[in-house]
Amino acid sequence: MVPSLKQTVLIILLAPCLQAHADESLKSIVPFLEKHCYGCHGTEKQKGDIRFDNLGKDLSNHENLEIWQGVLDQLNLGEMPPKKQPQPSRSETEQIVKSLSKSLKLAYEKAESTGGKTILRRLNRPELRNTFRDLLHLNGSEYRPGAAGSKLVDNNGNGSVERTGNDPLRFFPEDEEDHGFFNIGDKLIMSDFYLKLVLGAVEEVLTQATRLESKPKIEARNFSGHLITDKGGHIIESISRKFNADFDMMATGYERFGRLAPTEIRGGVGVSTRYKITVEASAHNKNHPWGELFDLDKKDPFQLCLNIADTKNGGISGPTSTPLKLWSIPDDGKKHSFTHEVWIDKTWTPWIGWENGPWDRSFRAETIVEKIIPNEFSKRPDKKANKEAHDKWPIQMAEKLFKNGYKGPHIRIHSLSLDPIIDTWPPKSHTALYGKGSGTEEEIRKLMTNFASRAFRKPVSQEMVEPYVQMVLARKVEPIVKLQGSIKDLKYKVYKGLWEKIPDFSTLQPISEGTLPKGLIDIKVSKMKEQFGMVFTGELNAPKTGKYIFEIASDDGARIIINDKIAIEHDGLHGAQLKKGEIKLQSGKHSIRVEYFGYGQPNSFRAGWGGSGMAHAKLSIDGLYDNSKNQKKPNEIPLLIRAMKDGYAAMLCSPHFLYLRENPGRLDEFSIANRLSYFLWSSMPDETLFSLAIKGKLSDPAILSQQVNRMLKDNKAQAFIRHFPSAWLRLDKLGDMPPSGGDYQFYKNLKVEPMLARQVTMYFEGILENNGKIEEFIDSDYTYMNKTLAKWIYKREGIRGERLRKVSLNDPKRGGIFTQPGIMTATANGVETSPIIRGVWVLENVFGTPPSPPPPDVEPLPTNTREATSVRELLKLHRNNEACSSCHVKIDPMGFAFENFDVVGRWRDKYKRARDPIDTTATMANGREIADIVDFKKMLFERKELVTRCLTNKMLTYATGRQLEATDRGEVDLILKKLSKKENRLRDLVTLVVQSKIFLNK
């Protein structure tokens, strides 16, 4: 076919561009290939069907790129040319490898390039959760700023994992990571599966926001005298109740004991709402006469810590326990009142503890009696001779303390009260969606327009909103058809077996069978707890022709088959996750078959069906919806509410909501508001940002600076404080290979890992809050620790309480963020340390100069180096490999400096079972000698501009949702120049990032 004039012109115009793709640097490699490769891979011979003499030099072509990569791999491995052929000199090979590596590196970068533009970016998990919270005015533990969200757990022990809790995104997979970042646009893909998860989450959050029940009647509760009315706690505190009727005594800090929660609400407060908590307490005997027995700092006031915890997830000593407020009590023996307001979920409870109290393991009544009143002391009776006397002895010793007048330091808790705060009803979450509930077209249109503007994060036209309005108007007048609430002629069969997927029951023999007169599926009739299957058959009646939705929530696999066609299937091992399926049915009778199997305990099966304009009906004994007094069933929800919920759900599944849509070039005012808000809050803009965008003021650098300061003071900035340092310093790797067993068993037993992560973020937060210098990341005379970290990691005495707090350091090895135990643990393999891993980490995340990937098929170092006398010797042998030497001369010196820090960041002078001290000396590629970690920090100070550049690049990546490219270098240079004039301060860097062209342009 002869090209048209238009096609010919297009080809002519594109020809220079196509030619430009050829990599000119590859021409210098051709003489090498002619000499050493064409004999086997040329015109006459093509071993392995590979030919080099006509190999394309356009590296944008993936086939060419793959072959050139193969050439480089073979040269690195030294396998080509074959040993029988003439070999190139080492210098010749090194020059070719260097040149080809550079060309391929540029080609890969170009292939991954987004042209300096942020790809249309979907909201990631934290962003979606936080946006639900702010858009719908939701409260709850799962919506706390900076909350980690749900994690995967194995609930039934069958090896399959599921997410638990109230997090609406608990079933979502983890977002794809890109060099530690979870908000990079081209990695956040969309799929049919993901959209189904979004729909499920949208329905859940809209149900949370909709409050059709009556205003909760919650009485204020006051607990006075003895808050704990049962046994338990530290023995001294427990015995004190026999002698003191008007208060509960706290005699120790909290570790095993020392946590005080009223017995009556130990299962939770019962109603989720905001509460005002008031604690009445007094401090006594700070200057006590028992000084030699307790290591208690008399300079500090007694501190009382208020916490909340989920009683259904570990309780007051479990992982959900969250500190809220720290109060200092005057040492005057008088009652003092302390108050705090906080939202508390119904299963959560408040508890208090003495933050800097004596360590409870050393606080023993018998020890005090023996030292203070020795004439009252007696030795503990032998257990074999008299078990009863042996068991009563600690109690008797404690009673002697009180009979002689208790003179030890303690806090008295006189009362704790909970006052519910419900200002308006229905709450804002409901009224913002449904207004006065008049149902007029005018109110519906106004409500949905306001919602769309907030959900889409920009002003919306009436044309954009109208389809949603019409959907609501049509559905609010649909008649509700009542569905058949049972299955006619329902029969069941029970099978025994161990399956991981639904078996072909037609090939199996049932062990029992029967009928269910009520017409509702009930797996309990199997009388089996695990390793069984069931088949239910019967008849359903569809009242009208249309689409029907079937729902199941089963543990484990199940499916519903209508007229021999699968309506919904949820096969495999899993928890009771709600699944939905749609099928079109004609009015009349239809056969139904339900198949189910249970692998292990617990077992459950719930099912129901419904459709547009049809009331939901259950198909199982256990319904899909909460039957509690205040929870409305779907068929009891007013038609207007159901219709509007459908309209809102459609908006929240729209690309306008799920994506951050930005036009190319300079960002408009609303895109700036969005980018700023998702940068610092991981959530949608608030009214202030939206108002400034409407007025066109967000392009003003001064206004941007004001907003950065305002937003960083908001509690929602915890999202930035949590997520950015994690991305920068690769804390996402913390927990990938956790240390365990032996010398590291404390790591798991004491739940150290969350403390390590929090220590890093608190350090970052402190510098950010005070606009500290970026050099403080390199070294400082302080860090953050609590009692556990002080004892087990830092080997320090005198640090009290479980709250991480700022403490001074006089050890030059320990300051800064790069040597913190969380970093050291994340850069170890759970067994032993590796200078390579830590060296690569430094190059990537401290200097921002990542090394090239290792060549293929190079023998790695063993992961367990405990038996090695010297890691240094292993690396020396490794560097003898020609393919490895050029990179390891840069990597290894960076890692050797950290070798005194073990797998969890404790200091060590020797490896286990080694005689000689650890050698941390190294010579950098530029010849700079490094003696140890202190010297290494001095080197970082010398190259602080490189450290600051890396931090700036990482922050810009996080802020824009794209990896930086070579074309961004000039703007980064400009930021660094401005920052140096401001003394390299962190908060100033955040402001300069927001004011930069990179941030303000797509």
Image (cartoon, rainbow, N blue to C red):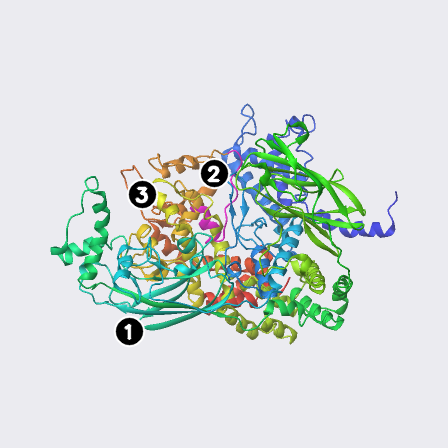
Using the image, tell me which numbered label, if any, was put on residue 334. Answer: 1
Nearer to us: label 1 or label 2: 1
Q: Quadrant of residue 255?
A: bottom left
Element marked by disc 2: helix
- Spot the residue most to the left: 375
Task: Indicate the position of residue 689 as horizontal and vertical percent values.
Answer: 59, 71
The secondary structure that dominates the magenta segment is loop
Element marked by disc 3: loop
Residue depicted at 51% across the width and 41% down the height: 156
Specify start and end residues of the magenta stretch as a single range. 838-857
Please give the residue where the numbered disc 2 appears in the rendered image.
884
Query: Residues at badges 1 and 2 in contact (C-beta under 8 Å)?
Result: no
Query: Residues at badges 3 and 2 in contact (C-beta under 8 Å)?
Result: no
Task: Indicate the position of residue 47 as horizontal and vertical percent values.
Answer: 65, 26
Of callouts 1 and 3, the N-terminal one:
1
- Spot the residue most to the top: 84
Picture quarter with the N terminus? top right
Question: Is 841 colored magenta in this rendering?
Answer: yes
Type of amino acid under label 1: Lys
Of callouts 3 and 2, the N-terminal one:
2
Please give the residue where the numbered disc 3 appears in the rendered image.
918
Q: Residues within 10 Å of mark 2 (few under 14, many from 20)?
A: some
Taking 550 as reference, is 209 left or right?
Answer: left
